[in-house]
Structures are given as C-alpha cells and as structure tokens.
Amino acid sequence: MDREELSRIAHADHPIKAPLGDDSVRALLRHTLPRGDERVLDLGCGPAEWLLRALAAHPGVRADGVDLDEGSLAEARERAEAAGVADRLTLHHTSAEDFAPPQPYDAVLSVGAAHVFGGLLPTLEATRAHLAPGGRVLIGDGYWASEPTPDAVEVLGDFSDLPTTLDKVASAGWTPVQAHLSTRHELDAYEWSWLGSAANWALDHDNPEVLKLVDERRAEWLHTYRPSFGFACLVLRRTHEGP
C-alpha cells in the first residue's frame, strides 16, 4: 500500500492531517483570513480540508489547492461539490515548484507538509513567491518540546526546539502575528485517531500488512517520540515587503 492511500485511510476520522482540534483550526483560519474575502492557496493541500473549511466559513473566499496525489484531489472535488463550494475552489494536479499562478495570493497555507519541501525554511521560501504584499502565511511543523532521543530524531527528523525554530523564522524575514502550539490532548487525540482508523480498516479487510504498520507506529509513538514531539502552527507576515 502506498503512503497516500494509507494516509487517506488513517485520516478518515481526522481530516485535518495535523494534531489540531476543530476550535484550533477555526481560530487559525480566523487569524489567517481576517477580512474573509481573501484569495487563498494551499501548497500540498491533500484532500483540501483546510480550504473547504475556509470556504464554508467565509463566503467571500476563493481558493486554490496544489497537490501531486490525484486521489486526494478527487476526494476534495467530491466534497467541495457536496458542500456547495466547488465554484470557489480550483485544484491543481502539479508540484509546488511547477505551479505558476497569474497573480499572488492574500494567504498561503502549508500545514504538515514541510517534508515535501525539505523542511520549514524551504517551505517558507516556497510560499514567498506566491504571497501578495501584506499577505499572511499559515504554516505548521514539528518542533522538539523536550530533548529528543537519537531514535526520535531518526524517526521524525532533525527539528529544532521552539525558541530556535522561531529565531530561524525571524532570521528568514518573517514576523509571527499569531500561533498555536498543539496541546497534549490534541497530540494524543491525533495519534489515537490515526492508529484507530488504520487498525479498524486493517481488521475489516484482513490486511496484516497495514496492521503491522499500525503496530510499528504505535510503538514508535509511545516508546520513541511522544515525550519530546511538539507541533506549532504559525501565522506569519513578511517583515519587509521588498524583494
């Protein structure tokens, strides 16, 4: 089973592919879309859950989503039609590097997709090219809430602690205007949802391969990275609007 198919199964009950509750998502979108009539781009949108929620909450918003997984985009199209927002959502089956819109966006989103770009700072650089003056970026990525073990770094990657992460963001020319740090409840609820959805599917379909992946992830989470992993969503503006 490929990674994208497993992800769709595991996120069946948690369509926001990040450790965030519904109230946190609403608050972040409110800070990212203060006017309610913005043009929004999601780089690595998957099934476009962030965009669908933004469109439902703000009738004046128009949105574009970019992703390489056609299955996720097909799901997004179906859900947009069902929600009555398909006329305000355009989906692009292409890479972020190849996406060349005719005009910049008031807001650019990329939550939980930094691995696609090679890390937090490369992701921010990718958003910069698409952001209109005065626009806002909503980005979400991991950080170390406490000293990680070498095994945790091997599993999740070489994050920084929160102060260092924010120092890097500021040095790259961005000013945080709002943020949310996922709570322990949000972090645990996300993992249990992922594990439960995938396990139920594996048991229903008698699929030992997926059940083995679930067992491995549960062990990694509980024994390796649960004590040290944190997740931060930042709403950012460019510190200087020049080139």
Image: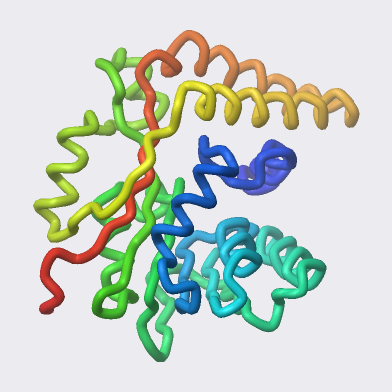
**Image-quadrant location for residue 47:** bottom right
**Image-quadrant location for residue 204:** top right
Against 223, residue 179 (above or below) is below
Q: Is residue 48 left or right of residue 169?
A: right
Residue at 13%, 51% (x, y): give it: 170
Residue at 74%, 31% (x, y): give it: 197
Q: Residue placed farthest to the top in the image?
A: 223
Q: Quadrant of the C terminus?
A: bottom left
Closest to the observer, 222 or 57: 57
Q: Quadrant of the N terminus?
A: top right
Against 9, residue 83 (above or below) is below
- Give the tally of numbered discs: 0
Q: Residue placed farthest to the bottom in the image?
A: 102
Against 40, residue 173 (above or below) is above
Against 184, residue 17 (above or below) is below
Closest to the observer, 40 or 24: 24
Q: Find residue 136 and report its horizontal and vertical position in percent.
A: 32, 66
Q: Find residue 162 and report its horizontal and vertical position in percent.
A: 23, 32
Q: Is residue 105 left or right of residue 75?
A: left
Q: How is the structure coloured here?
A: rainbow
Residue at 73%, 38% (x, y): give it: 13
Q: Residue placed farthest to the front in the image?
A: 35
Q: Find residue 87 and report its horizontal and vertical position in percent.
A: 69, 83
Closest to the observer, 115 or 171: 171
Residue at 81%, 68% (x, y): give it: 82
